Image (cartoon, rainbow, N blue to C red):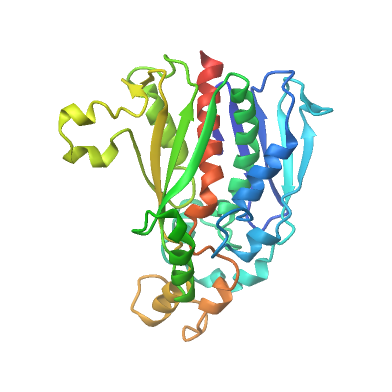
Amino acid sequence: MNSIGDTFVFTSFGESHSAAIGGVLDGVPAGLHINFDMIRAALYRRAGRKSLNVGVSARALREADEIEWLSGVLDGVTLGTPIAFLIRNRDARPEDYEALKHSYRPAHADSTYEAKYGIRDWRGGGRASARETAARVVAGSIAAQMLAERGITIKAHLVQVGGETNAERFNEVIRRYQTEGDSIGGIIRCEVTGLPAGLGEPIFDKMQAHLAYAIMSINACKGFDYGSGFAGVSAPGAVANRQSGGLLGGITDGTTLSFRCVFKPTPTTPKALKQMQNEASPLPLPKGSGEDISGKLTVGRHDACVAVRAVPVVEAMTALVIANFISLA
């Protein structure tokens, strides 16, 4: 599926090295004054141009991420009709991935996409690339602005890189792994304030279930917890009971909603690809199996810590989920 939502629906399209990516957002009410600067700021953060930018891929820094508004907006005001937008891929370089025509990268969706469809876009992973998340950030920023009018705010931040929880040392940790030709994962915490009590449905439409569904759809996300989460297993009930994360029975209780998500290390690194070349592996090697493809696929194209740039994507997906519940209420 390429869409999320029931009455507030976002659909994304495009591949990493195709002409463009983009989306259609349906369900935005008429009369919303869009703050385009806020959208650009969110894209700026997703590109790694603000705060932490160590180990950020060169492509992310080169892409202008200029938005072409195709429909649904007039003079900066929403019309109540579907909002369609386009972001052209200015730095698409499919030739960088020629070696992948005959090889699958470790821990990527290359083999599974081909198993499912009988064909795959080897140009940087196609739809499986995190390039697609730029469209999510645009749509999520619009949703966040709609929610802000109701006093609802969403803020996510990086709280852990590897085993390090001191934010002042995150750059140092990322730089060390990048220098070693490797990568490292991270944890993001997201908090939503201003939510009314009563959002969410019993059993199969619980708020946390929808949030987990949305957050786990983000590239490289490997886990989701809320409230006391996994840490709560070692806490006595009297303590864990006070850490509900703003949800009871899958329904918001009017307090701050809080959850965490974990992102794995980037799988495409010089160290990982050399291992693929030099060790016995069930994965087929490219033509000329002695060829070292690690340099061809990693120079400037991948992040040393994807969690850094995932922060605004987490905010975007959270906004889309909550906006959908608001529209259903």
Q: Residue furthest right?
A: 75
Total marks shown come to 0
Pinpoint residue 108: horizontal percent, then vertical percent.
45, 60
Quadrant of residue 201 within the rendered picture: top left
Pinpoint residue 74: horizontal percent, then vertical percent.
83, 26
Front-most of residues 24 and 316: 316
Residue 98 lies, with reference to residue 159, above or below; the image says below
Q: In percent of the image, x 80 and y 29: which residue is there?
A: 76
Q: In percent of the image, x 45 and y 34: which residue is there?
A: 191
Quadrant of residue 256 within the rendered picture: top left
Q: In percent of the image, x 73 and y 32: which residue is there?
A: 35
Q: Residue furthest front?
A: 168
> Is residue 194 visible from the viewing direction of this image?
yes
Pinpoint residue 123: horizontal percent, then vertical percent.
61, 63
Pinpoint residue 269: horizontal percent, then vertical percent.
47, 70
Residue 52 lies, with reference to residue 175, above or below; the image says above
Front-most of residues 140 and 90: 140
Side of 198 where 76 appears, left or right: right
Side of 259 where 16 appears, left or right: right
> Is residue 108 visible from the viewing direction of this image?
no
Q: Residue furthest left?
A: 236
Side of 89 where 242 appears, left or right: left
Front-most of residues 92 and 319: 319
Side of 290 where 74 appears, left or right: right
Q: In percent of the image, x 44 and y 54: which residue is there?
A: 167
